[in-house]
Amino acid sequence: MERSQQFSSIGGLTIIFFIIAITISLAFYQFVFLKELNLKPSIPEEIANPPQPLTLTIAEGASLPTNPIFFDPIQARAALGVDNKLIWENHDATAHTVTTDNDYEDPLSGKFDSMDTIGLVPPGGTFEFVFTEEGEYPYHCEPHPWMTGTVTIVENFS
Ligand SMILES: [Cu+2]
């Protein structure tokens, strides 16, 4: 084989590899990257990571139906982009859950249910959830269904 022929066959292979690489990149972009973009809604940073989380308490003695208070406050209200990250602190000696009444799933955080992420909230433990949509979210404790509460998320009007 002459030197010039050798060069052109190497050049041809290089071009073929180059075309294959571009095809794979485009396919990856189209099927993986774009699909992911479409699945994950773009959520503003201040809503995904609000500046002032709102803390709630699971009251001491909440496992007893006669307890005067269970989730405190029983109706919590937070604004998107301000305090739409809620943190439940368990001040009771018993483990509890924070579980949606209606299978609510947040686009960013997933199902509103501590059982889906950390399971039972142990005594002294916390459960965090970021709500990224306006709405009213009733919830309860799985082992103690008399424990109920509501989270209301409103737009930030300030
Ligand atoms: Cu409970």
Image (tube, helix red, strand yellow):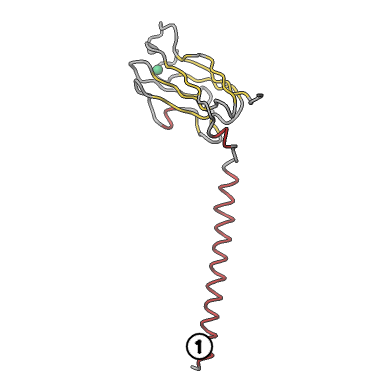
Residue 62 in the image: x percent, y percent? 40, 12
Q: At x 57% / y 31%, what residue is drawn?
A: 132
Q: At x 47% / y 14%, what residue is drawn?
A: 72
Question: Toward the viewer: 104 or 84?
Answer: 84
| Extreme-right residue of the structure | 157
Count of residue discs: 1
Q: At x 61% / y 26%, what residue is drawn?
A: 134
Question: Toward the viewer: 94 or 91?
Answer: 91
Residue 92 in the image: x percent, y percent? 36, 15
Residue placed under numbered mark 1 in the picture: 6
Q: At x 54% / y 69%, what residue is drawn?
A: 20
| Extreme-bottom residue of the structure | 2
Q: Is 76 situated above or below 65?
A: below
Question: Toward the viewer: 58 or 147?
Answer: 58
Q: Is 150 situated above or below 114?
A: above
Residue 54 in the image: x percent, y percent? 50, 22
Is the distance from the Cβ of mark 1 to the nearest ligand 1 atom less than 8 Å?
A: no
Q: Is 113 situated above or below 145?
A: below
| Quadrant (top left, top right, bottom left, bottom right) of the C terminus | top right
> Which quarter of the frame holds ligand 1?
top left
Q: Is 8 situated above or below 107?
A: below
Question: Toward the viewer: 88 or 63?
Answer: 88
| Three-letter amino acid code of the residue under disc 1 | Gln
Disc 1 is placed on an element classified as helix
Badge 1, how many Cα within 10 Å: few under 14, some, many 20+? Answer: few
Residue 87 in the image: x percent, y percent? 46, 24
